[in-house]
Image: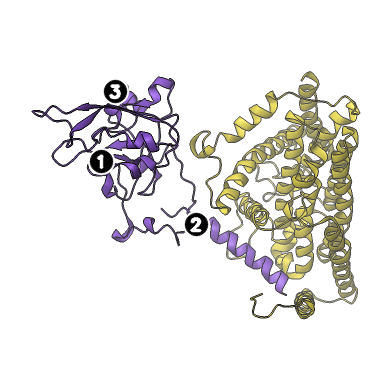
């Protein structure tokens, strides 16, 4: 009996699957639900006063295992400082083709200036366009280079293909598309006990 | 490519002509047929409608099956071509027609080209037998193409012929995978056809006719045949699945073991023809099961008999069940299949046939047959339970581990 019963039971299981919601995320049509601690395109954050946090110490460049970061510091103008410290980053470039998004730069940064954000749609046509400078990474910048280029071309706001439940505190001031949480409880950061696809 | 197109038009014309010829007054018996024959042109129109309809149904069956399978696996399935993926069959058709048509050098070229044509032709000609409504409900014509007194025999003959397509394909390809696949397929089909044929003897005995239209009419007055021959119904449903080479019995084309089975060496439209034949078999099976056992296009009394509608719904139901089973169950191993075919299905079908025959000879009424059926089901359930208990008690069980 057990084998026949098992066959019947298996039919029930698949029938239940038929009436459940597919786990597929139709990505380009629908945004990808990301975790709050996703490692995406870097963000250069600012103090609440508007001064840049980066002091041009190059520790991020030193720790970078992929040698993807180039920093050129300069002295702050005391009358009109760019950063909160003595010096600031005159040039801050990350080669996104080299970057492995490990997040070591974020850990090395003494001022919490460079933080990994959420943008990941960086595919582009030229190598040179994948080197992101300060103007591409400062906290007020929305989207990646190709996304902003497209927004200028179409005249529409930057369209990003993801949502996050909330923006983590380190990314202070960074605007990311938020998604509704069920019952106000976001379970994503627990990282376990989470059924696949139930974002 | 040229031979291919010639072949393609050839088979469709051949199938149509065959259907028309079979329905011509010379061949079709008129003794049991109280209705006037349709004019030949109408028969031709119906034949081509059936073929066209079947091929369209095949195309959309592939889509429906893929979408349903995807949903069974909690995915979305193909939904990119057209709204809801509705143009996917068209894209598939264009792809398979435009693909390079390869004929292996060492193959027997004539047979190689002929095999898919045989396969699809004999798959197509079976469907014309199914009645879809009362006489005269097809714009004044009859809603069937052929009305044969030997209807079920004809169906068996046609479906047996379809095995030739598979077997010749495997032989002509000159490839070990194809040959193994076709051997499996032939062996399996022979063992299944026996049970299939035997299982249908019981309902034929009960009704006293091989004519599908008369079987449907008999069920309208006496009740569905599933009541009188539920065991035959079970055996027939299982063997129909095997006949269409569907999942529990799809080992002729077990992709994981045999590359593609008998159609390994086939490409482009010839491969599509084999797929087509398989799906047409499936559709024919899902039309035959309700026609023979579930009242065909008629419904029991309080529900009005609506021509076409009930039949289409019943076909859809069985197609769904076939897809459901494909999404759930595993493939039987070759020896399991053989043991199941010869050791279980055939004896059960034979035994039930003998019981029915005895009951008929002893002049048992139809109610007695229903009681006999219930008894038969009880016996089968008892055997399964006893067997299960035996297996369970013989299986060593680890302590503290949930079975």
Q: Residue at x 57, y 48 (%)?
A: B70
Q: Circle 3 is placed at which residue position? A: A152
- Residue B267: x %, y % from top left: 76, 30
Q: Which of the two labelled residues, at mark 2 and mark 3, occupies the earlier sequence position?
A: 2
**Residue A59 percent across, percent down from the top left:** 33, 37
Label 3 lies in what chain?
A
Figure quadrant of the N terminus of chain A:
bottom right
User: Left or right of B356: which side holds A62?
Assistant: left
- From the rendered image, report the letter of the chain displayed in yellow: B
Q: Position of residue B30 (x, y in %)?
A: 84, 47
Q: Who comes first in sequence, dot 1 or dot 3?
A: 3
Q: Secondary structure at mark 3?
A: helix
Return the residue nearer the eye: A162 or B44: A162
Residue at image position (49%, 47%) is A24
Per the image, the residue denoted by label 2 is A20
Q: Quadrant of residue A68?
A: top left
User: Element under label 1?
Assistant: loop
Q: Are marks 1 and 2 in contact (CB under 8 Å)?
A: no
Image: B310 above or below A124: below
Question: Is residue B25 among the parts visible in the rendering?
Answer: no
Judging from the image, what secondary structure is the residue with disc 2 in? loop
Same subunit, tags 1 and 3 = yes
User: Quick one: A194 or B48, which is closer to the camera?
Assistant: A194
Chain letter, disc 1 residue: A
- Could you tell me which residue is drawn at 79 percent across and 32 percent down? B266
Closer-to-camera residue (B100/A27): A27
Q: Which residue is mark 1?
A: A174
Q: Nearer the viewer, mark 2 or mark 3?
A: 3
* Of marks 1 and 2, the one in the foreground: 1
Q: Which chain is purple?
A: A
């Amino acid at each position: 009996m057990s084998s026949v019963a098992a066959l019947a039971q298996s039919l029930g299981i698949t029938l239940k699957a038929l009436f459940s919601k597919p786990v597929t995320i139709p990505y380009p049509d629908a945004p990808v639900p990301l975790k709050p601690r996703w490692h995406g395109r870097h963000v250069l954050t600012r103090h609440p006063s508007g001064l840049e946090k980066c002091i041009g110490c190059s520790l991020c460049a030193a720790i970078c295992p992929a040698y993807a970061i180039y920093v050129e510091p300069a002295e702050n103008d005391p009358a009109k400082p760019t950063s909160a410290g003595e010096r600031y980053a005159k040039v801050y470039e990350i080669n996104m083709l080299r970057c492995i998004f490990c997040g070591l730069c974020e850990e090395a940064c003494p001022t919490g200036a460079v933080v990994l954000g959420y943008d990941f749609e960086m595919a582009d046509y030229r190598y040179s366009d994948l080197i992101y400078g300060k103007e591409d990474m400062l906290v007020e910048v929305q989207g990646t280079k190709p996304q902003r280029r497209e927004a200028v071309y179409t005249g529409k706001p930057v369209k990003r293909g993801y949502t996050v439940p909330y923006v983590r505190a380190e990314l202070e001031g960074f605007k990311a598309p938020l998604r509704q949480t069920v019952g106000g409880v976001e379970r994503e950061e627990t990282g376990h006990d989470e059924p696949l696809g139930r974002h | 490519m040229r031979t291919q197109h010639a072949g393609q038009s050839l088979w469709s014309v051949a199938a149509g002509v065959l259907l028309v010829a079979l329905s011509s007054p010379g061949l079709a018996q008129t003794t049991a047929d109280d209705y006037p024959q349709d004019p030949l042109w109408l028969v031709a129109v119906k034949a081509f409608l059936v073929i066209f309809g079947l091929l369209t149904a095949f195309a959309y069956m592939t889509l429906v099956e893929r979408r349903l399978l995807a949903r069974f696996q909690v995915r979305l399935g193909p939904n990119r071509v057209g709204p809801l993926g509705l143009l996917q069959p068209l894209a598939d058709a264009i792809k398979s027609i435009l693909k390079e048509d390869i004929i292996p050098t060492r193959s027997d070229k004539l047979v190689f080209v002929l095999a898919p044509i045989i396969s699809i032709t004999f798959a197509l000609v079976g469907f014309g037998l199914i009645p879809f409504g009362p006489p005269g409900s097809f714009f004044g014509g009859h809603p069937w193409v052929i009305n044969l007194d030997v209807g079920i025999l004809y169906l068996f003959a046609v479906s047996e012929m379809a095995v030739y397509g598979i077997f010749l394909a495997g032989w002509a390809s000159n490839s070990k995978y194809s040959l193994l696949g076709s051997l499996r397929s032939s062996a399996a089909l022979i063992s299944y056809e026996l049970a299939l044929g035997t299982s249908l003897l019981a309902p034929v005995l009960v009704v006293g006719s091989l004519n599908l239209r008369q079987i449907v009419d008999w069920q309208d007055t006496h009740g569905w045949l599933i009541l009188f021959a539920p065991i035959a119904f079970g055996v027939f449903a299982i063997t129909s699945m095997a006949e269409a080479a569907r999942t529990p019995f799809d080992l002729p084309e077990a992709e994981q073991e045999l590359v593609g089975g008998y159609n390994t060496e086939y490409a482009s439209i010839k491969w599509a023809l084999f797929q087509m034949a398989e799906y047409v078999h499936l559709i024919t099976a899902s039309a035959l099961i309700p026609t023979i056992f579930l009242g065909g296009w008629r419904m029991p009394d309080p529900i009005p008999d609506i021509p076409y509608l009930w039949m289409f719904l019943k076909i859809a139901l069985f197609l769904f069940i076939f897809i459901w089973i494909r999404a759930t169950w595993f493939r039987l191993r070759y020896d399991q299949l053989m043991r199941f075919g010869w050791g279980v299905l055939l004896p059960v079908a034979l035994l039930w046939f003998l019981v029915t025959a005895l009951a008929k000879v002893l002049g048992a009424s139809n109610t007695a047959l229903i009681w006999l059926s219930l008894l038969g089901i009880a016996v089968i359930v008892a055997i399964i339970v006893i067997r299960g208990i035996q297996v369970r008690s013989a299986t060593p069980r680890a302590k503290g581990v949930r079975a």
